[in-house]
Image: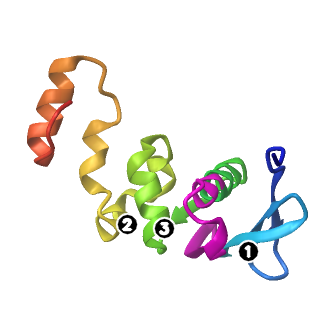
Amino acid sequence: MRAQMQLRTTDNPRRGRFELYADDELVGHVTYAVRDGVMSVPHTEVQPRHRGRGLASAMIKHVLDTARSRGLAVLPLCPFTARYIANHREYLPLVPAGQRARFDLEDLEDLEELDEPDDVDRAARATGAAAE
């Protein structure tokens, strides 16, 4: 049985992308451009034989953490990146408030600070989702 893959994400600014390596094999990348303090993220790709293992999510997490550490805002032009942010609301503040509707992220603002079950139920009704 093969040991667990060693994952490594690196920034390759010359090519405008973050690259994900499993062991020493390039298995995916996220393209980006930075201008005026904003990182645009137009594309995420994982090689077909490596899909379904959470590798794209691992890359996006690294990209968003890097943007945060560099003080950059993020425009999630890639639909996968926008969905990741929708599912990991701690990254929502990276998307400028005036741009959130463009990525279907505007309704998430009220859901950031939910602590009580009643709040969760109320938020689920407001968004049309079923509370679990």
Using a 10 Å C-alpha cutoff, classify the residue at mark 2 as few (fewer than 14 neighbours), some (14 to 19) or many (20 or more): some
| Amino acid at the residue labelled 2 | Gln
Compared to residue 46, the image places residue 111 above or below, namely above
Classify mark 1: residues with Cα within 10 Å, few (<14), some (14-19) or many (20+).
Answer: many
Label whose residue precedes the other's in the sequence (1 or 3)? 1
Left or right of 117 on screen, residue 41: right
Q: Secondary structure at mark 3?
A: loop
* SS for callout 1: strand
Query: Quick one: label 2 or label 1, which is nearer the N terminus?
Result: 1
Q: Quadrant of residue 83?
A: bottom left
Q: In the figure, residue 53 lies in which quadrant? A: bottom right
Label 1 belongs to which residue?
Answer: 17
The residue range painted magenta reads 36-58
Locate the C terminus by quadrant.
top left
Left or right, 106 with reference to 29:
left
* Number of the front mark, 2 or 1: 1
Q: Which residue is mark 2?
A: 99
Q: Which residue has dot 3 on it?
A: 76
Residue at image coords 15%, 20%: 118
Label 3 is placed on what type of residue?
A: Pro
- From mark 2 to mark 3, how far is it between C-alphas? 10 Å
